[in-house]
Amino acid sequence: MNSRKRLSLLSLLSLFIVLMALAACGGGQSGEESTGESGGEQAATTEGKVVRVYTSWPLQGPMLPEGQSMKRAADLALKHYLDANGGKGPGGYTVEIVNLDDASPTTGSWDGTIEAENAQKCVNDPLCMVYFATYNSGAAKVSIPITNKAGIAQITPANTYPGLTKPWAEGEPDIYYPAGNRPTYFRTNATDDLQGYSAASWAKCLGFKKVYILDDRQLYGKGVADAFEQQAKKVGLEIVGRDGVESTDIDFRALLAKVKDAQPDLVYGGFVIDSGGPQIIQQMATLGLFDQGVKFMGPDGLVNPALAEQAGGAQVVDGNVLLTFPGLAPNLLETESGKKFFNDFIAEYGEEPSPWSTYAYQAMQVILDSIERAAAGGEVTRATVLDAMRNTKDFEGITGVFSFDENGDTTLVQMASYSVENGEFKFEGAISPEMADSCP
Amino acid sequence: MNVELLVNQLVIGITIGSYLALIALGYTMVYGILELINFAHGDIFAFGFLFSLTVLQFLNLEYPLSVPQIISILGPVMVLTMLAAGLLNVFIDRVAYRPLRNAPRLAPLITAVGASFALENLFAIWKGPSQIFYPPYVPRVDILREWLGIDTIIGFSTTDLMLLIVTIPLMILLSVFVRRTKLGKAMRATAQDREAAAMMGINVERVIMSTFFIGGALAGAAGMVFGLYLNTGRYLMGFEAGLMAFTAAVLGGIGNIAGAVLGGYFIGIFKALSDLYLPSEWTRAVVFAILVLVLVFRPAGLLGQATQEKV
């Protein structure tokens, strides 16, 4: 073996590993184009009155517990519907739920290429009437244009990134709707801009003065942190620093030493449970930031039953962690159907539903209702289902009564705040962007 | 410029460097002998973390432990972890690399990636895909402030000390082993020329097995110390750590043991300083930019001559 050959092999290997690293942290920004020219007028009536709903969200990796719970919530919504209608599906149709997974086995997190394939599967199946996806807002960026071109209604159980439906970053939201024809994408939960604004106003009301903002540099985490920063400036909080972290890293001490040196009294972290949030909290504790009275505030991505355990136990998070959630957690639902959902879920699956299961259930309710109304109007096609979903008015979901506005967003905005007590989330009341004007 | 903060970051960099160096040694040793990048090596590190955690949970201890307990319990657990991690690495060699010993070089590279994925997914099943909490068995006391009464922002705690106490002697031990023992000599001979070594009566397969065992044991030790030290991890932690350690090994001159240690500390310190002076999203870019620069000007790595001599 001569040395030249060895060196060239070495550089090849180095290149290979750098590429692997890029693939892992890039999260897959592939914007695969839709090839479906179908336009979407296939009537489903011919094939034994079956219609399908394709779901797509992570069903492996760190997101598995949440993904599994959302899948179960969707199944439960269908079961409840059938029970209430004597076993008959909407308009006599049999509704089949096809569960797809948009996570990559390599990274365990959502992947753009897989998400594009999933959306394409729905487009290619003439029986697919609704694409029920995604969990991650970044993944929705990939699939919304595909379903939009095909004229299929897409509804999400969890996306909170504002730009998907309203003006936010440059060109948004129109870049996601190449066929125009809006809205083709709907959500029954509130968005991050409102969540970030509310969080900053809440922080102001709690008496914090100096904030250090961290995020995981992903669409969701950065989006909510940006909104927090905007509102924080408006209500007069001092921003002493801002950093994005590598979400696959687990050793954040070097960064947190810098944070500590900036002497904030609050660290705001735009994270989800699998992008470093629990580690930031745990290492804030080991570096003594909590001992100095610094608190951590985060968005709904961290409102996850596993947070306390992963961050090092109740003694770490208790009293130190504050969280916001753009909606109502399953155990706080006040409607009759909401309570039934919560109790039946526990009875059926032996565990409490995850936070987003509320909205997975509610979105499934909307889907079934839209199919029912489409069927009542004549035939069930992609176009009639989409039309019915657009005309969702004063719908009684499990979080309350709402309609869809011209962007496809819900008219019912609920925003909750939490602290942590004995490792459990404790409801601290409703919050809003305007609360800083007159703190409760 | 804040000098105390700089020193603090250097301390953090050295602690990061310590566990990176320990992992990098395994990459470099296997490369030295087989010219194979053992991609599964980072996952052996994660295995050390998970295995030791499982054993400690089985013992059902109250934490934090007292000093005699640390020595009498954590010591044997570490030996057990190193043994298990070493055997796992030997097993990987047996099933994934050995059947391809004479195949084109790309073949074991692909099985290495495959072994890595297989391990990662087994880990996800074993301890779940979420972040894993590793209880703080070693009590964390800030030495400078609480024992010496110095008022400083430099954080140097008992866990930092533990990390150094475990990793540095292991590195010294390895270097003595390779230089002074018969097996170490056989390793160096095999690294220089596998065929000639075989002709001189060295049992090359045994040398390869020992190399995998030692490399794996070091990574396993690193995994356990990392757990005790940082108290957190996840099933994919081997990927990130492996990436940085591999970079460290290449930076120092792959195949060169001193180079791997130097590269580990180098990267640890650069990571910490980059976090301090640049937005932290640049940290990886800085690390890889340094790698590229070093390879452009010194293609064999920082301590590369040693490698070239032997070829």
Image (spheres, rainbow, N blue to C red):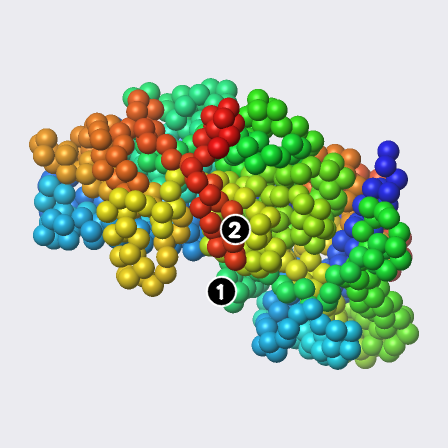
Q: Locate the C terminus of chain B and report the quarter of the image it occupies.
A: bottom right
Would you name the residue on which mark 2 appears? A420
> Foreground mark, 1 or 2?
2
- Residue occupying the point 38% across, 42% down: A328
- Residue occupying the point 22% across, 34% down: A395
Do marks 1 and 2 both belong to one polypeptide chain? no
Instruction: Using the image, tell me which numbered label, if any, was put on residue B145.
Output: none
Is the residue under label 2 in contact with that under label 1 (CB below 8 Å)?
A: no
Q: Amino acid at mark 1?
A: Ile
Q: Viewed as shown, does residue A54 lie left or right of A418?
A: left
Q: Nearer the viewer, residue A405 or A115?
A: A405
Residue A174 x %, y %:
40, 21
Circle 1: element type: helix
Up/down of A263 relative to B205, above or below: above
Would you name the residue on which mark 1 appears? B125
Q: Amino acid at mark 2?
A: Val
- Residue occupying the point 62% across, 28% down: A237
Tell me, yes or no, if residue A77 can be seen here: yes
Subunit ID for the residue under disc 1:
B
Circle 2: element type: strand
Count the labels in the image. Answer: 2
Subunit ID for the residue under disc 2:
A
Can you tell which quarter of the image residue B168 is in? bottom right
- At label 2, counting other C-alpha atoms closer than 10 Å, the crowd grade (few under 14, some 14-19, many 20 or more) is many
Residue B300 x %, y %:
82, 49
Residue A3 x %, y %:
81, 52
Can you tell which quarter of the image residue B1 is in? top right
Q: Nearer the viewer, residue A89 or B43?
A: A89
Can you tell which quarter of the image residue A393 is in? top left
